[in-house]
Image (spheres, rainbow, N blue to C red):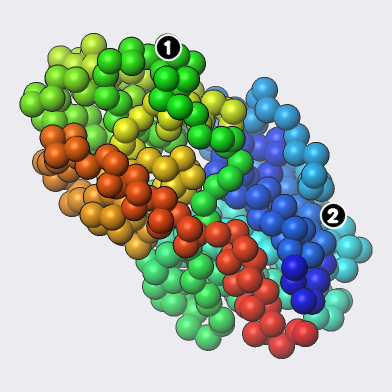
């Protein structure tokens, strides 16, 4: 338990919104409360306008609301009146500090304005940003001024990879920054056996499954994995590629790639958002998780794999090599299909699964939510508030 409990507000997505950042915020809120703080979340009533959202829905359909944390949906990201309302609500709650999740410049005006409005007319409320990204994976005009607007509203920053820290220092070298890796997720249930998992997903238990999990966007390199899988499966006909995640990119382009390679019978696609209670079966069925990203900072998928004890292949981009030690918890490859294919082949031909699973289990112990809470506590104290 924290020796000095604080009143803390997290500003960012949470249930009924879906996705990794919402999941993270809910676990962080719960962890802060468990460490003796009083924490709640102020979330979005409208996160993205529908014309800017590439998925089918922004909401976690068929999932139940968490009953052990308080979530208030109040913020409309494009409606300034709601920013005033949110700031007023936060001032009424009199937090010692607020934590704002920042992941995309588009949110800069909204979140930066709320931070300024909270501080206006109050004394002592500090703003700590948890920055998932500073430079976005998919760049757009006006990214820099929107990001600057947000950064200038904050007192301190927590980042989860060296690459994000370096990006942040290009904007501001004066404010405190602490690096604390993304913790292991603990919200997806117990590890499911392989037998249970393949039965639940209606998969043939005689094959070895390589998993691509999560939202499908160009920068995540699924096309590289498909090419790599073609090469690896030529020498190992027992391989199957399991793709599980919602397409935020042109699905037909990937389908054409699969058809042209003649591997339709070797690829299983569950191209929808995977509910929390189903996640464990995808990892339980799989021998190996591949993140063939062209660009990355850190990844929640990595921490899900750690939770379920599954070895990984990650590319040498962003913070991924910091989180997956090469040869211990998996492989770090170049960003090309040949390098990825070689890692897949080595894993199965040389029977690396048992040793790498042991490495995954040991490495996972270093990524705790208690450490994340302590990093935030220490960062807050560094701002001079006792």
Residue pictured at 68% horizontal, 77% vertical: 380
- Left/right of residue 296 with respect to residue 241 in the rendered view: right
Around disc 2, counting alpha carbons within 10 Å, would you say few (fewer than 14), some (14 to 19), or many (20 or more)? some
Res 179 seen here: yes
Residue 324 lies, with reference to residue 242, above or below; the image says below
Name which of mark 1 and mark 2 comes first in the sequence.
Answer: 2
Give the x, y percent position of residue 211: 34, 31
Disc 1/disc 2 C-alpha distance (Å): 48 Å
| Element class at badge 1 | loop
Res 113 seen here: no
Give the residue furthest to the right: 92
**Observer-nearest residue: 98 or 67?**
67
Which residue matches tag 2?
Answer: 85
Q: Quadrant of the C terminus?
A: bottom right
Around disc 1, counting alpha carbons within 10 Å, would you say few (fewer than 14), some (14 to 19), or many (20 or more)? few
Give the x, y percent position of residue 352: 22, 42
Give the x, y percent position of residue 105: 52, 57
**Observer-nearest residue: 242 or 222?**
242
Residue pictured at 85% horizontal, 77% vertical: 122
Which residue matches tag 1?
Answer: 202
Residue pictured at 77% horizontal, 58% vertical: 33
Residue 88 lies, with reference to residue 301, above or below; the image says below
**Observer-nearest residue: 114 or 21?**
21
Give the x, y percent position of residue 144: 46, 64
Quadrant for residue 101, please give it: bottom right
- Left/right of residue 41 with respect to residue 191 in the rendered view: right
- Left/right of residue 295 with respect to residue 150 in the rendered view: left
Q: Quadrant of the N terminus?
A: bottom right
- Left/right of residue 146 with respect to residue 377 in the rendered view: left
| Element class at badge 2 | helix
């Amino acid at each position: 338990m924290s020796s000095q409990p604080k009143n803390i507000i997290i500003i960012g997505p949470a249930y009924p919104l879906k996705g990794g950042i919402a999941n993270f915020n809910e676990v962080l809120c719960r962890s802060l409360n468990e460490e003796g703080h009083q924490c709640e979340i102020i979330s979005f009533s409208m996160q993205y306008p529908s014309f800017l959202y590439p998925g089918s829905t922004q909401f976690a359909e068929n999932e139940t609301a968490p009953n052990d944390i308080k979530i208030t949906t109040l913020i409309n990201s494009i409606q300034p009146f709601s920013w005033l309302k949110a700031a007023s609500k936060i001032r009424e709650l009199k937090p010692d500090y607020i934590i704002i999740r920042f992941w995309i410049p588009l949110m800069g005006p909204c979140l930066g304005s709320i931070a300024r409005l909270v501080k206006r007319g109050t004394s002592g409320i500090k703003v700590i940003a948890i920055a998932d990204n500073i430079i976005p994976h998919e760049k757009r005009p006006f990214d820099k001024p929107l990001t600057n607007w947000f950064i200038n509203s904050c007192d301190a920053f927590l980042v989860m990879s060296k690459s994000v820290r370096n990006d942040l220092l290009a904007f501001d070298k004066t404010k405190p920054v602490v690096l604390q890796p993304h913790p292991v997720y603990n919200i997806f249930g117990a590890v499911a056996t392989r037998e249970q998992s393949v039965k639940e997903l209606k998969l043939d238990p005689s094959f070895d499954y390589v998993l691509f999990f999560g939202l499908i966007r160009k920068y995540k390199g699924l096309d590289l994995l498909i090419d790599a899988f073609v090469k690896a499966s030529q020498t190992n006909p027992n391989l199957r590629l399991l793709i599980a995640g919602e397409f935020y990119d042109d699905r037909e382009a990937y389908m054409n790639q699969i058809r042209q390679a003649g591997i339709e019978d070797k690829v299983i696609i569950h191209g929808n958002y995977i509910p929390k209670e189903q996640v464990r079966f995808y990892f339980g069925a799989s021998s190996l998780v591949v993140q063939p990203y062209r660009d990355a900072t850190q990844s929640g998928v990595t921490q899900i794999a750690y939770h379920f004890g599954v070895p990984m292949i990650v590319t040498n981009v962003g913070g991924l090599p910091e989180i997956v030690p090469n040869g211990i918890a998996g492989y770090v490859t170049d960003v090309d299909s040949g390098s990825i294919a070689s890692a897949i082949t080595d894993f199965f031909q040389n029977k690396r699964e048992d040793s790498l699973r042991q490495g995954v289990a040991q490495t996972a112990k270093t990524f705790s939510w208690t450490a994340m809470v302590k990093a935030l506590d220490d960062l807050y104290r560094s701002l001079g508030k006792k």
